[in-house]
Image: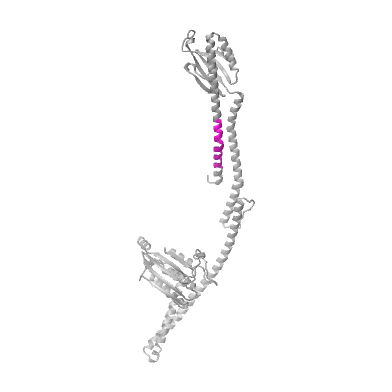
Amino acid sequence: MKTIKTRFIFFTIVLIIISLGFPIFFLISQFRINFNQRSGIMLKTTLDLLNYTLENTMIEGDQKNLQGVIDSLVNQKGIDHIRIIDTKGIIKYSGLKKEIGNNVKEINYKFNIDSLTSLKMSQFKDNKYLAFSPIMNKPSCIECHTGKVIAYLDVGTNLTPAETKFYTGTNHMIFLGIAILLIISAGFWFIFQTFISKPLQKLINAMQEVKKGNLSSSLKIERNDEFGIVNKNFNLMVDRLRDSQEEINKLHFEQLQHVDRLITLGELTSETAHEINNHSAIIMSRADYLSFEALQTPEISKYSDDINVILNQITKVSEITRNVLKHSKKVEKNFERIDLVNVIENTLNSLHPILIKRNVELIKYILPQQAFIKGDALQIEQALTNLIINSIDSMNGEGRLKISLIDADSLLTITITDNGSGINDSIKEQIFLPFFTTKKGGKGSGLGLYIVKNICKNHNAELEMESKAGEGTTFKIIFNVKRVKHEETINN
């Protein structure tokens, strides 16, 4: 019953049996009831007639006439035999002359006459119906007979030739019904196999090929029925999948090329930052020496302010190169107890030059002085960096960026809000997909928000986004502090 074909054939047979078998069964049962009733009526009528004739004949003493009456009745259609048997079992009168004088046991009689005291009726083989009735000793017979029972009357009826054929026909109806059931079942099986099972199997095989990656698979459209429509739509679907696969492969190759260039650029940036850091160290050491000499040499002291400016600027250069080196290194995941306040400050310090250059107003609202979670500081910095850079790019120059950290109900929530161009409703479901970007001129890799989403997932944090085109965007990263503490307790 696991296949449609098996269920179809099974329920078809059940419906045929219900719709065809029950009427035939009812019709045959009704015919047989009618035959039984007809035979019973004929038996009773014959018995009544014989009893009446027998009584009158015996009273008049005309026993010879009794045999004539029996002979005339036996010749009637539907009468099989008539016998009168005495109490000793000897057949006195019979429609078959050769039986007269024989004991009833010699003819393999159905009834045991020694135990019969009342009317008995029974159906015998070959559609014969038998009746055996004792002839009671009535007051008018006492003068000539003794005992309670004088003799026994045996009457048998059968169906007429026409009735026999009709009765046999009811049996033939059973075989006819079975034959019809087999023919209809075979017909339905052939129809299902030809018009449903084979086309369906072809569709399944084609889908298996597509599942294996064979996008050149197609189905022939040989008919205009439902399967023809399904085959046509299947071919269209495979064509679109093939076109999409080609586009994906093309885009993937382009992105791989772009990522490869980014990796090369990252390596060059790392080397450049390292070299800048070396030269910065030399400049810093020289400037620091001049600052020390300015305290002791009047000729140099007048340049103290300039030397301090050089020291401050070269310190900032060193911080920038140090951040570049930190983010360019490939490090293993390191989940430990970290302070989100420090992570946010480090991220903002790294992005400070970009904020100044883009003329972005930064608003900070850090409510707790410390906010500890278990996580990877570098990953969270990367997530915050991606979100902030996206916000800066959406503002196209001047704008306002608000970053907040709130601790409420055991939830630490980092919120990043900008007043940039916002996100259209039509692409909100796609912004977290890999390689999806709205930045033009090859400016984005399309991996920023995808990476942010996975970093949040790694930290069991929820990422929420609200945006309205033309008004700005808000991203929220929500950490469940209770869950972190619970996990720390279990691990300890």
Q: How is the image coloured?
A: one colour
**Closest to the observer: 272 or 107?**
107
Could one spot residue 255 in this view of the protein?
Answer: yes
Name which quarter of the figure residue 39 lies in: top right
Q: Residue at x 54, y 68 (%)?
A: 255
> Which SS does the magenta portion mostly show?
helix
Could one spot residue 345 in this view of the protein?
Answer: no
Give the image location of residue 170, x and y in percent.
Answer: 58, 30
- Residue numbers of the magenta segment: 9-28
Q: Residue furthest bottom?
A: 299
Give the image location of residue 54, x and y in percent.
Answer: 53, 13
Quadrant (top left, top right, bottom left, bottom right) of the C terminus? bottom left
The answer to whether 12 is drawn above or below residue 137 in the figure is: below
Count of numbered labels shown in the rendering: 0
Name which quarter of the figure residue 23 lies in: top right
Give the image location of residue 19, x and y in percent.
Answer: 55, 38
**Closest to the observer: 172 or 425?**
425
The answer to whether 106 is drawn above or below residue 461 in the figure is: above
Q: Is residue 123 magenta?
A: no
The answer to whether 79 is drawn above or below residue 380 in the figure is: above
Q: Is residue 13 magenta?
A: yes
Left or right for 237, reference 300: right
The answer to whether 244 is drawn above or below residue 10 in the figure is: below
Q: Residue at x 49, y 77 (%)?
A: 272
